[in-house]
């Protein structure tokens, strides 16, 4: 499984803990000191090995007393404690991606007599329940401050509590007798490792005293619209309330029976690792040998699935044929516009991409597996995504795609909306919800779709429509297309003294759910919620869709309280001040120079945004605006490496009737185009999306 805590950054956490050293009531003259030879060893894994993570050990004083070598492919680690280390201990396994995202897991040891010590999502859950804040990454500082206790009694009681909560899955995987902290296991997809593959743990700090926790049970055998069972509670909840509220019995959760037969097949994590190695081997093949038509100094070719000639590449697809792959309407190819599924196969620059960190996400109704992965190119750039694979008669996993003919996706989405023109910053607000995304495709002179009706996990239906200039289908309000596909389920002002809804002051073209969801209702939305899309092609105004597709979210949207704890990248003051000074004094919008792209940088060409330490860096800027005297909307975006701090947005037309781009300069804007919004966008390892949105328009209060 994938471990889903969002860390503030191990470097910051460790620094704070070290500064706390010597201030703890635990640091007493008769506290037992560890001899120099004390060693912890065990397995760090989420199901798959936690490859690349470094294990650090902090003692009862918050002092760093041990550091391991990076965890290898088997998940094993060993760390020897410094002389004088004082029990109890908090163990943190942490790894950092290329863009600075930090994944962390936590474990505990109450004494120096411990020899085997695992670090997994389950041990992190134990640390969360031992923590007074519910945040496992704060446990070490809480122990150092004397506000949390890690003793033999508290650890034993918490382990027993966790085993009661997980009882149905433990029984189904034959691991009821295992101690999650100390029972040895291998990362082979069997036994306790199968248990880890079968659950999905989210621990999200929500306040200074509590975290929201969800344990998803990855049962198989249902339809694509089946909702997996979940266990939801807060870190300060009692065991009795947890088992009662979630209807946990010895063999079921929420009325769903959990058996060996309806959990992920044993050994699946090994198959995923093998598949990702096969995919890596494909991209290791030289460009000229990978696809036909590549020769000499060529850096890319246009081609279809038949152009993929390397056996190492053909063999990673179902039936050894790239033509069998279909995902959201995309097939294996590279067009002249560099579009197509696995278009990177047709580019020399993709040679050497490495695929790793595989995770089992869920099983589709037809038995295909959805798996997560990380890819890393030769320049160090990393991305995280999912793939659909099918198990062949030889038991190997190969690419198949979701076999859907139409584009679609749904993501947990979060936004901080900053009003930087017309002195409206007092109305800045947070919002949380989901984006329902379908590309705004053309079919000749007309849009491809009349509309797409989307049924949410709670049974409500929303509808999105084509709009000239928009790259994706959008909601309508009073029959008029908006510029958004974001369902704002919850929203609150940055100023906590303002208790009315932001929808009352920002009411024109955004989509707020009515009624707005409470914090408890947002937290109760399951991580793997099912969304059903009904596609109506252009001209189909009836009630029968032309196609139906379903999607599952990878994680739920954060509550507003959880979102307030997140840091975001910000535009530098010079940029926001310049926008405020240049904005139209009546409307707040910013005009773009005709026959120029949009330069997102300072006047001197300097950085446009800053990224504080521990904050997720943006990888996209999107600008939103109006053209045709304000009658039509548009959006244009540019993606870039996480190390970038400035960019240029090129104009791109979305339909035949879209006239916001220059007719004389490619990538430039036409005269009269105005920008009313810009966002700095990022996606985390777990699929959640975040945008710091800078609004440039006059607020319209609700009547």
Image (tube, rainbow, N blue to C red):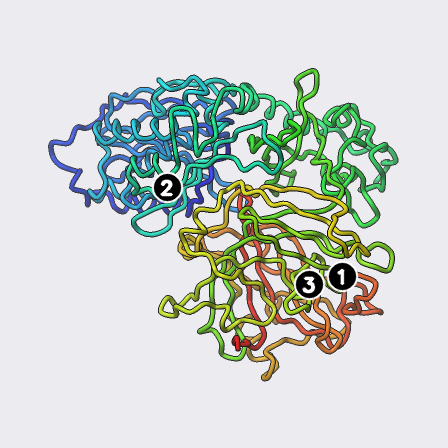
Report the residue marked by disc 3. 635
Q: Position of residue 413 (x, y in %)?
A: 54, 53
Is the Cβ of the residue at disc 1 closer than 8 Å to that at disc 3?
A: no
Q: Nearer the viewer, residue 84 or 163?
A: 163
Q: Nearer the viewer, residue 595 or 36?
A: 595
Q: Is residue 280 visible?
A: no
N-terminal of the pair, mark 3 or mark 2, is 2
Report the residue marked by disc 1. 652
Q: Is residue 1 visible?
A: yes
Q: Residue at x 50, y 18 (%)?
A: 190
Report the residue marked by disc 2. 233
Q: Residues within 10 Å of mark 2 (few under 14, many from 20)?
A: many
Q: Residues within 10 Å of mark 3 (few under 14, many from 20)?
A: many
N-terminal of the pair, mark 1 or mark 3, is 3
Task: Tell us which disc is closer to us: 1 or 3.
Answer: 3
Q: Position of residue 207 (x, y in %)?
A: 34, 52
At numbered mark 3, what does the secondary structure look like: helix, strand or loop? strand
């Amino acid at each position: 499984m994938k471990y889903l805590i969002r860390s503030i950054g191990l470097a910051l956490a460790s620094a704070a803990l070290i500064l706390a050293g010597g201030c703890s009531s635990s640091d007493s003259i008769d506290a037992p000191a560890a001899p120099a030879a004390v060693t912890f060893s065990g397995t760090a894994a989420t199901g798959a090995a936690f490859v690349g993570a470094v294990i650090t050990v902090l003692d009862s004083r918050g002092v760093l007393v041990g550091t391991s070598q990076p965890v290898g492919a088997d998940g094993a680690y060993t760390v020897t404690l410094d002389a004088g280390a004082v029990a109890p201990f908090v163990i943190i396994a942490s790894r950092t991606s290329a863009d600075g995202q930090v994944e962390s897991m936590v474990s505990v040891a109450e004494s120096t007599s411990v020899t085997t010590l695992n670090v997994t999502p389950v041990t992190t859950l134990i640390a969360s329940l031992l923590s007074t804040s519910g945040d496992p990454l704060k446990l070490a500082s809480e122990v150092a401050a004397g506000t949390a206790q890690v003793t033999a009694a508290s650890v034993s009681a918490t382990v027993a509590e966790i085993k009661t909560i997980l009882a149905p899955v433990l029984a189904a995987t034959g691991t009821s007798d295992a101690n999650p902290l100390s029972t040895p296991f291998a990362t082979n997809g069997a036994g306790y490792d199968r248990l880890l593959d079968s659950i999905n743990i989210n621990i999200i700090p929500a306040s200074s005293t509590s975290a929201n926790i969800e344990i998803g049970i990855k049962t198989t055998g249902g339809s694509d619209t089946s909702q997996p069972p979940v266990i939801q509670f807060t870190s300060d909840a009692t065991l009795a309330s947890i088992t009662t509220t979630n209807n946990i019995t010895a063999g079921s959760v929420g009325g769903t029976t959990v058996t060996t037969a309806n959990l992920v097949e044993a050994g699946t994590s090994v198959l995923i690792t093998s598949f990702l190695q096969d995919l890596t081997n494909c991209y290791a093949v030289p460009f000229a040998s990978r696809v036909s038509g590549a020769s000499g100094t060529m850096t890319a070719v246009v081609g279809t699935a038949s152009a993929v000639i390397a056996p190492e590449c053909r063999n990673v697809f179902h039936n050894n044929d790239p033509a069998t792959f279909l995902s959201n309407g995309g097939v294996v190819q590279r067009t002249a516009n560099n579009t197509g599924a696995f278009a990177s196969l047709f580019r020399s620059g993709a040679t050497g991409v490495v695929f790793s960190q595989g995770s089992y996400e869920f099983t589709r109704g037809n038995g295909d597996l959805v798996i997560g992965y990380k890819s890393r190119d030769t320049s160090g750039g990393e991305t995280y995504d999912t793939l659909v694979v099918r198990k062949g008669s030889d038991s190997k996993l190969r690419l198949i795609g979701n076999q859907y003919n139409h584009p679609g996706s749904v993501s947990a989405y979060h936004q901080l909306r900053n009003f930087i023109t017309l002195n409206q910053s007092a109305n800045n607000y947070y919002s949380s919800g989901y984006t329902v995304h379908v590309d705004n495709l053309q079919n000749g002179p007309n849009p491809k779709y009349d509309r797409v009706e989307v049924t949410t996990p709670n049974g409500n239906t929303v509808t999105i429509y084509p709009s000239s200039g928009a790259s994706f289908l959008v909601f309508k309000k009073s029959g008029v297309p908006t510029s958004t596909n974001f369902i704002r389920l919850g929203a609150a002002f940055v100023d906590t003294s303002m208790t009315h809804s932001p929808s009352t002051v920002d009411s024109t073209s955004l989509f707020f759910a009515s009624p707005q969801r409470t914090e408890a209702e947002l937290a109760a939305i399951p991580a793997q919620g099912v969304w059903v899309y009904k596609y109506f092609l252009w001209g189909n105004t009836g009630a029968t869709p032309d196609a139906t597709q379903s999607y599952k979210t990878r994680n739920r949207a954060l509550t507003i309280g959880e979102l307030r704890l997140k840091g975001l990248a910000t535009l530098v003051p010079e940029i926001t001040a310049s926008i405020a000074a240049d904005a139209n004094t009546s409307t707040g919008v910013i005009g773009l120079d005709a026959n120029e792209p949009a330069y997102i940088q300072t006047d001197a060409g300097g950085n446009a945004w800053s990224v504080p330490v521990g904050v997720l860096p943006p990888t996209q800027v999107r600008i939103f605006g109006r053209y045709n005297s304000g009658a039509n909307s548009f959006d244009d975006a540019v993606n870039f490496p996480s190390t970038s701090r400035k960019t240029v947005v090129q104009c791109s037309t979305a339909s035949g009737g879209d006239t916001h781009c220059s007719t004389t300069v490619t990538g430039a804007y036409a005269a009269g185009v105005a920008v009313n919004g810009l966002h700095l966008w990022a996606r985390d390892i777990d699929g959640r999306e975040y945008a710091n949105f800078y609004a440039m328009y006059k607020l319209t209060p609700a009547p």
